[in-house]
Amino acid sequence: MNTKRSAINKRTDSELRVAIIHDWLPLVGGAERVLEQLLEIYPNAEVYTLFDFVSREDAPFLRGRKVSTSFLQKFPKVKNYYRNLLPLLPYAIEQFDLRQYELIISSSSAVAKGIISSPDQLHVCYCHSPMRYAWDLQAHYLKHSGLSSGIRSGFIRYALHKMRMWDVISSNRVDFFIANSSYIGERIKKTYRRESTVINPPVNINRFQIESNKEDFYFAASRQVPYKRIDLIVEAFKLCPDKRLVVIGDGPEHKKIKALAGPNVEILGYQPDAVMVDYMRRAKAFVFAAQEDFGILPVEAQACGTPVIAYGRGGARETVIDKRTGLLFDQQTVPSILHALERFERLKDNFNSAEIRQHAESFSDLRFRQEVKHYIDQRLVEKDRSKFRPPALYGAENIPNLPR
């Protein structure tokens, strides 16, 4: 028995059969950066996902790698409407056959954690968030999608009701949860009644160069969707004609945001990554109004030595140190942003670019790989030990002179 256990504990990563399950691959964002680093840890892992639309130029870490997709991928022109297939996603994720793997890692903010595994397999979920639109942010999403009332609203509300039921059931299929922030750890506890271990997402700090000589403009960037609240930032700067704002990003709200902009606000739309990083380095501050699960962009700005003015809820409270690496404001409102801008102008000379950069380095991708590898290694050892623990005879310790 001891020999077998020793052999298992000495098993190399290349011998470990690993599957990584990712919700979907429409583009490269923060969740995909996590997937990239998971594949650095387990280069022989096989990838499963519901949809794969991402260009390999944008995701070079997937070049030459087989990515198994669900049957939904075969639907005609599914890229145009895959988000509308929400009721089918739980069924689709359950159809993957993962019996051959010893370790399953799900990278999930929706349904990836719902894959079906056996007691012999270890399933660790790296949770970006419980489904936002199905739980506490349902009312927000319905309002900003124009679905607060009406027949279609009723249908979607019922679909989300069924999704919540499945979501709780599927959370019990996970052996261990990793949360991407303490904020998400609290959401996991509230939603699933499960404990989690916090390991912050990876940020590629090395691709950013510090810039100490800042120029006289503020910068904002993100996908232009309702919850990012770029509209609030633009409205605030419209009331400050003496302050210049540059905005990079595209999305469903782009036309609305462009219409809100005053002459002191420059809306550049989508730009290559190099352009965005250049503006981020030169800006006097990065402005961020979203309540994010973690928020990689504020960390990237700090990697450039750029202070961050952020809404003080969600992940920003864990990545921005108030009055040291930036400023936090209390409410998602125009007056709150205006007050933060006034405070920043008074305190801007107190921020040290080198100190801000040093703080950002604590979120590096190397740190992520080390922490995830260590955590999963521990869980694997525990799993192996439980497999080979000899069964105890019930109550035997209380029976005197048990025959041998």
Image (cartoon, rainbow, N blue to C red):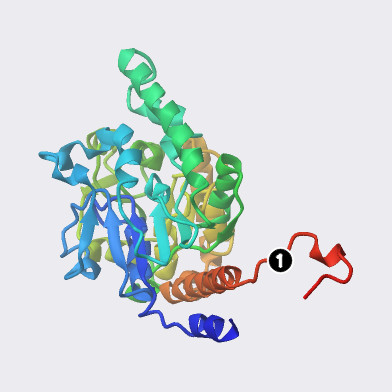
Residue placed furthest toward the left: 76
Residue 29 appears at what percent x and percent y?
31, 56
Q: Residue at x 16, y 40 (%)?
A: 78
Q: Say which of 268 and 171 sits in front.
A: 171
Q: Is mark 1 on a helix, strand or loop?
A: loop
Q: What residue type is labelled 1?
A: Ala
Q: Residues within 10 Å of mark 1 (few under 14, many from 20)?
A: few
Work out whether 379 lies above or below 107: below
The part of the image, by quadrant, that contains residue 131 is: top left
Residue placed furthest toward the front: 403
Residue placed furthest toward the right: 400
Q: Position of 134 compared to 21: left or right?
A: right
Q: Quick one: quadrant of the N terminus?
A: bottom right
Q: Say which of 358 and 350 sits in front.
A: 358
The part of the image, by quadrant, that contains residue 158 is: top left
Give the total number of marks visible in the rendering: 1
Residue 308 appears at what percent x and percent y?
47, 57
Q: Residue at x 51, y 39 (%)?
A: 168
Q: Position of 139 compared to 96: left or right?
A: right
Whether residue 125 is visible = yes
Work out whether 76 lies above or below 201: above
Q: Say which of 89 and 37 sits in front.
A: 89
Residue 291 appears at what percent x and percent y?
48, 44
Q: Quick one: quadrant of the C terminus?
A: bottom right
Residue 211 appears at what percent x and percent y?
38, 73
Q: Which residue is drawn at 53% across and 39% down?
A: 336
Whether residue 347 is visible = no
Work out whether 13 lies above or below 265: below
The residue beneath circle 1 is 392
Q: Say which of 116 and 148 sits in front.
A: 116
